[in-house]
Amino acid sequence: MKVLVINTGSSSIKYQLFNMPSGQVFCSGLLERVGDIKGILTHKTYPGTDKELKHVETKPIRNHSVGMARVAELLVDKEFGIINSANEIDLVGHRVVHGGEKFAKTTEITKDVKEAIKHLSPLAPLHNPANLIGIEVAEQIFAKAKQVAVFDTAFHQSIPEKAFRYAIPSKFYTKNGVRVYGFHGTSHRYITKRAASLLNKPIEEVNLITIHIGNGASMAAIKNGKSIDTTLGLTPLPGLVMGTRSGDIDPGVIFYLNETLGYALKDIKNILNKESGLKGLTNDNDMRVITERVEKGDKEALLALEIYTYRIKKYIGAYLAAIGEKPDAIIFTAGVGENSAVIRLMAVGGLLHLGIELDAELNKKGGGERCISSTNSSIAIWVIPTNEELEIARQAVGIA
Ligand code: ADP
């Protein structure tokens, strides 16, 4: 079965073509600066296990339609293609950011589902409209394929009301849906399934703290294989310190910036989403650069790492309490979590009294799924690389 996974952003499209159920990747690609005259398309084909054929185009990509049409051409291209016709695609799995309370599961896309995704757009104004464009373009190009929506919020729909409600007037929840939804659900779900398998436990019995730290970042408390709390909320702003997003702040900061310092609301929104987090603290948002600065003795960069990892540590404490029993494991994933030994060390350092200790040597070794806790640690610590695209493909096949 050939399954194409599409993740459409406001100015980008990511795609991967899978052979399912084996999970073999036929090709993958990224279109950047969609809608810009300086568009970039990177297409990679994997003709053999260790072979990679890379093709890059830099030319205007007028809109998502034009971009997807070019992807469809490349899929059947004589040199870089992998199939003979767009009709060979059996399933298209779309990442959709916001499913609200309506979508707790992966869903086949119908007219009504598209309407509902549109209706949820005020909750994800940058993402849901772009996801819808991706769906509509794919419906035309891959007309024979079943189209499936996999929602980033779905895995967190098991969070109980005491954890998902904000203590603001109830009407904002009952009438307007203001509550915690959480994001990165596809990643937390994939990690939960992998962890259950690696720990040799049925998924219904696995208790975890999952730490997804990439550009965006979130943690989840997993009890009996289900999400019971997470750090992102109505929007992807709260919780951990991120590349450019602030994470938790006192909401009063917004009024102070507005009323006392005279910043307009739209500027504050931009500051908290694009100018804060690691970037706000150091002027850099790439963890590699910040870590190099720390190695050279840069105090500002060190403070940023301290703030970043202290926040993770605080949530580990909170989620130990929320889970209410000793979790089986703490899992690090995504760009920073998979690659940065120093961040992992700072995040869980000094927690032996809670049964958490890294093995310094194992932590420094790179590569793949690995347990990095010491023999003293009663809670295991793992690194498990995430694979959101594969999870979307599996979810899509699951309802096919
Ligand atoms: P996204 O949220 O965009 O999917 P990723 O999960 O790819 O992000 O993570 C990207 C981040 O991972 C980058 O900001 C980069 O700082 C960080 N990263 C990647 N490799 C390393 C590394 N070797 N050491 C530290 N950080 C890294």
Image (cartoon, grey):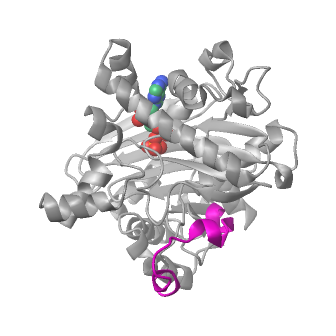
Query: In the figure, 227 relative to 293: above or below?
Result: below
Q: Position of residue 54 (x, y in %)?
A: 44, 32
Q: Position of residue 78 (x, y in %)?
A: 48, 42
Q: Residue at x 19, y 51 (%)?
A: 37
Work out whether residue 237 or residue 53 is closer to the camera in this orientation and state it: 237
Q: Residue at x 52, y 85 (%)?
A: 174
Work out whether residue 158 or residue 29 is closer to the camera in this orientation and state it: 158
Query: In the figure, 151 relative to 200: above or below?
Result: below
Q: Is residue 62 visible?
A: no
Q: Which residues are magenta?
A: 155-176
Q: Residue at x 85, y 51 (%)?
A: 205
Q: Which quadrant holds the N terminus?
A: bottom right
Q: Residue furthest left?
A: 262
Q: Quadrant of ligand 1?
A: top left
Q: Position of residue 10 (x, y in %)?
A: 34, 59
Q: Is residue 315 magenta?
A: no
Work out whether residue 349 or residue 107 is closer to the camera in this orientation and state it: 349
Which quarter of the picture shows residue 22? top right
Looking at the image, residue 322 sits to the left or right of residue 308; the answer is right
Work out whether residue 85 or residue 188 is closer to the camera in this orientation and state it: 188
Q: Residue furthest front?
A: 353
Which quarter of the picture shows residue 370? top right
Query: In the figure, 133 relative to 237: above or below?
Result: below
Q: Position of residue 325 (x, y in %)?
A: 79, 48
